[in-house]
Image: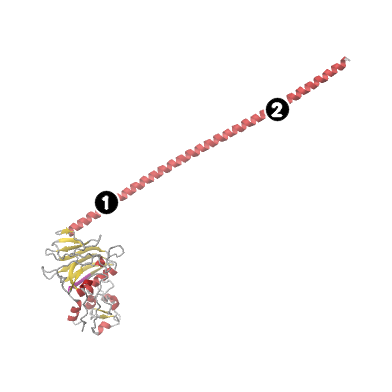
């Protein structure tokens, strides 16, 4: 029986060995798996770390780039701001220098113009009729610069303005009658029924109402004649430049002028208007240019006076007849009559061209003339 026992032991031994081998194989398998998993984990962690490092590096680079761009932008903005500031300072300096130069030139011009005259200030609405001798006064309303000069006798002899700026009733305090002031200076002579308180530069043209802009002016001349016409021409043109008025007197005692001479430029054309301080209707009648005239032709309250775009007047009920030439509807050459080329014909220009007064509405010249009272006749 011993061989049987030996066989059983061998079998058990084999089984035991097999079990050990199986366990060992399982252990090795488990170990290999664990090692593989550990390796995979390590590789994943390494990859994740690498990605994190790459991401961190990219973020750092992006941040550095953004900071660099922001810095460059800030520097560019600072440079642009500095350049803009320098430009603004340069422009301000140039402007200040230009203004200083203009001011200096204006001062020099004024000193030249005002040489021999004392510059004084007079309120635009001062009603005193007294004028100081040898003075110059600004008679422009607001910021306008209109200069009036008196001679040694206190007579207003000259008015100048580089530019005539029209009245602006939308921005300036103007009365319902188109005036800056309710009344005008009482210059000796205006108390006469035949004279208005006549502006050298009308309210409508930006002139004030003190004695340095007022002269006693024949009422018809002021309201309907050459004075009124001259003012309308400037208004219709939107203003004028190089304006000068020369006022002449018959003697050194009176404040009533004998004549006026206006020189100004409109639309590039130089205009010269000269007329006496007389009733143009009476002159026309004395020259035989009208046959008859209603006695109501010049009556109106003196308070409706002079030189305003809104001045009122009574209608001129003229019934005068004229020579056949006054009603001619035959066309003609306007350039031969309109000597100053401003597109409008004055009574004087028409008379100088040989036309008799009045010019009626059916005459070819009528559209080029000013019919102040709207009665269909000019120069009646």
The magenta-colored residue range is 272-277
Residue 81, percent across and down? 37, 46
Residue that appears at 17% across and 63% down: 149
Q: Secondary structure at mark 1?
A: helix
* Among the 4 quarters of the image, the one containing residue 374: bottom left
* Crowd band around label 1 with a 10 angstrom C-alpha radius: few (<14), some (14–19), many (20+): few
35 or 266: which is nearer to us? 35
Q: Secondary structure at mark 2?
A: helix
Residue designated by label 1: 97
Residue designated by label 2: 30
* Among the 4 quarters of the image, the one containing residue 351: bottom left
Q: Main secondary structure of the magenta part?
A: strand
Residue 34, percent across and down? 67, 28
* Side of 109 relative to 41 (left or right): left
Residue that appears at 50% across and 37% down: 60
* Among the 4 quarters of the image, the one containing residue 214: bottom left
Magenta stretch: includes residue 372: no
Whichever of callouts 1 and 2 sits on the residue coming sooner in the sequence is 2
Considering the image in quadrants, where does the N terminus appear?
top right
Residue 17, percent across and down? 78, 21
90 or 205: which is nearer to us? 205
Query: Can you say whether 277 is above or below 93 in the image?
Result: below
């Amino acid at each position: 029986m011993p061989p049987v026992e030996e066989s059983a032991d061998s079998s058990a031994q084999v089984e035991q060995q097999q079990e050990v081998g199986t366990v060992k194989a399982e252990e090795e398998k488990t170990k290999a798996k664990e090692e593989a998993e550990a390796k995979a984990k390590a590789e994943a962690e390494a990859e994740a770390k690498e990605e994190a490092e790459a991401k961190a590096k990219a973020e750092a680079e992006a941040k550095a780039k953004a900071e660099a761009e922001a810095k460059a932008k800030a520097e560019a903005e600072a440079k642009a701001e500095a350049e803009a500031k320098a430009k603004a300072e340069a422009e301000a300096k140039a402007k200040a220098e230009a203004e200083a130069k203009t001011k200096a030139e204006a001062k020099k011009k004024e000193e030249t113009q005002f040489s021999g005259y004392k510059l004084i200030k007079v309120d635009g609405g001062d009603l005193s009729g007294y004028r100081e001798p040898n003075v110059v006064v600004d008679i422009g309303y607001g910021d306008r610069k209109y200069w009036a000069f008196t001679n040694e006798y206190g007579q207003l002899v000259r008015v100048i303005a580089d530019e005539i700026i029209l009245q602006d009733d939308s921005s300036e305090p103007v009365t319902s009658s188109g005036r800056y002031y309710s009344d005008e200076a009482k210059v000796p002579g205006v108390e006469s029924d035949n004279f208005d308180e006549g502006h050298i530069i009308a309210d409508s043209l930006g002139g004030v109402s003190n004695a340095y802009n007022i002269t006693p002016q024949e009422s018809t001349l002021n309201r309907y004649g050459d004075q009124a016409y001259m003012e309308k021409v400037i208004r219709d043109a939107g203003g004028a430049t190089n304006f000068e008025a020369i006022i002449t007197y018959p003697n050194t005692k009176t404040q009533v002028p004998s004549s006026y001479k206006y020189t100004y430029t409109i639309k590039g054309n130089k205009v010269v208007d000269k007329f006496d301080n007389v009733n143009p209707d009476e002159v026309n009648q004395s020259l035989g240019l009208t046959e008859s005239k209603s006695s109501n032709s010049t009556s109106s309250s003196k308070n409706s006076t002079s030189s305003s775009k809104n001045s009122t007047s009574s209608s001129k009920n003229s019934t005068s007849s004229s020579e056949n030439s006054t009603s001619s509807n035959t066309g003609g050459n306007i350039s031969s009559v309109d000597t100053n080329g401003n597109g409008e014909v004055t009574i004087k220009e028409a008379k100088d061209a040989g036309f008799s007064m009045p010019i009626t509405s059916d005459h070819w010249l009528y559209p080029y003339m000013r019919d102040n009272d709207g009665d269909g006749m000019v120069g009646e």
